[in-house]
Image: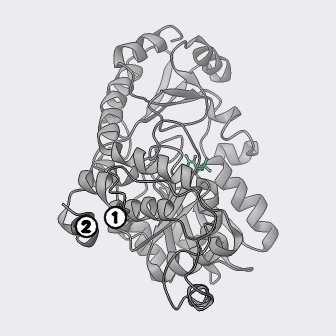
Amino acid sequence: MSTDDINNNPDQFGLETLSIRYGQVRTAEGEHSEPIFPTSSYVFASAADAAARFSGESPGNIYSRFTNPTVRTFEQRLAALEGAECCVATASGMSAILSTCLGLLKQGDHIVSSASIFGSTVVLFEKILSKFGISTTFVQQGDYAAWQSAIKGSTKLLFLETPSNPLTEIADIQKIADIAHAKDCLLAVDNCFCTPILQRPLDLGADIVIHSATKYLDGQGRCVGGAVLGKNDVVGEGVYGFLRTAGPTLSAFNAWIFIKGLETLSIRIKAHCENAIILARFIEKQAGIERVYYPGLESHPQHELAKRQMKDFGAIVAFELEGGKEAAWKLIDSTRLISITANLGDTKSTITHPATTTHGRLSDEERNFAGIDDGLVRISVGLESIDDLISDLKRGL
Ligand SMILES: *Cc1c(COP(=O)(O)O)cnc(C)c1O
């Protein structure tokens, strides 16, 4: 089969097939696996050809800050998986969020964001974008009236993560998209914890999807990258326009690693979810545990919404220990298999203490508002044998 069949008709193929084959364009060498194009620039047939490319009159590669075939294959494959018209790959997940904001907003604009988001995103909104006159109001993710009343005349963007990090709160994407659209705002969803295998925010009414490819898209903890997806007239113009000039570009090498990561995405996510529910149920039964946060548990307050909105429940399990920070650190330090590191979405399970790491730069007040207690521990459940993961936790529990 030629790669054209699938590239021209993505709607006729399943997500598993798209994640393995979409977006590949074979060169004259007939290579089976996708090639890497490590080149900074491209040669033109003539001065006139160069001029036509630069003016946009003729399509084609110009310079790898904004056109690279390997990066393009990653972008097109991820776009097919998310059901997006357009994807712009970026150097990191944070630069995906930065490019979205600087590409689409201007001085005086306002963001309404869930308080339950990645710690660096809070810092970006509060400390960096504010310097350029873009302000943010944070709301409790599940308080729909608060979302509505936080929107003002200058609000352009609503922002959320679902499930949230680290408390796995679920936001009703459709509901918040309706709130955004009633006031002519865009809704951006950071889909890092789910990937399109579990949830496709654009199908639920979101306008923009953001990824930290560093997490599940790579899936093996090798490199940093990100992506922004959405409509051509939003992401294709504003975000791509920003990236083309400002340059937070994904490298061809990293794009190639993500292409290979996507090929196993669906089976990895399935296996991650299978391990996570077993581990969550185990932790819930232990003494000294105040609460377990995992959307797959019947005890999760939004279990029903999660069942409706997601195909499965993901692999981030957070829980609160009765003894506060001391108990949390003791548990973390008792592990011998699970890695003490803040990365997530890796085949290797990781354990972290959000209050002093990922959310350590937040003020006490911000941390309280986000619900991050000192006894909270977050595990990104990997693909090791579940019995080994349970044994590793038993030691410290
Ligand atoms: C890690 C992460 C980011 C930032 O991505 P980087 O690739 O580390 O820049 C953004 N959002 C979420 C939910 C994350 O977990």
User: What x and y, as percent, mark residue 298?
Assistant: 30, 36
- The disc label shown at residue 380, or none: none
Q: Mark 1 and 2 residues: CB-CB less than 8 Å, in contact?
A: yes
Which residue in the structure is indicated by mark 2? 10
Q: How many marks?
A: 2
The image quadrant that residue 328 belongs to is top right
Residue placed at 47% from the left, 12% from the top?
Answer: 392
The amino acid type of the residue labelled 1 equals: Ala
Q: Position of residue 324 (x, y in %)?
A: 64, 23
Position above or below: 241 against 223? below
The secondary structure type at the circle numbered 2 is helix
Most distant residue in the top direction:
395
Q: Is mark 2 within 8 Å of ligand 1?
A: no
Position of 155 relative to 1 (above/below): below
**Dot 2: within a 10 Å radius of its alpha carbon, few (fewer than 14), some, or many (20 or more) residues?**
some
Q: Position of residue 157 (x, y in %)?
A: 57, 73
The residue depicted at 70 percent of the width and 48 percent of the height is 366
Closer to the camera in the image, 393 or 100: 100
Residue 111 x %, y %: 63, 70
Specify few, some or many for label 1: CA neighbours under 10 Å numbering under 14, 14-19, or 20 or more: many
Q: CA distance from mark 1 to mark 2?
A: 7 Å
The residue lying at 77 percent from left, 62 percent from top is: 128
State the image quarter where residue 261 is shown.
top left
Sooner in the amino-acid sequence: mark 1 or mark 2:
2
Quarter where residue 27 is shown: bottom left
Q: Nearer the viewer, residue 339 or 16?
A: 16
Q: Which mark is residue 80?
A: 1
For residue 132, above or below residue 15: below
In the rendered view, would you say 42 is above or below 189? below
Left or right: 333 with respect to 261?
A: right
The one of 384 and 262 positioned closer to us in this rendering: 262
Task: Using the rendered image of the protein, determine whether residue 189 is visible from the camera's viewpoint.
Answer: no
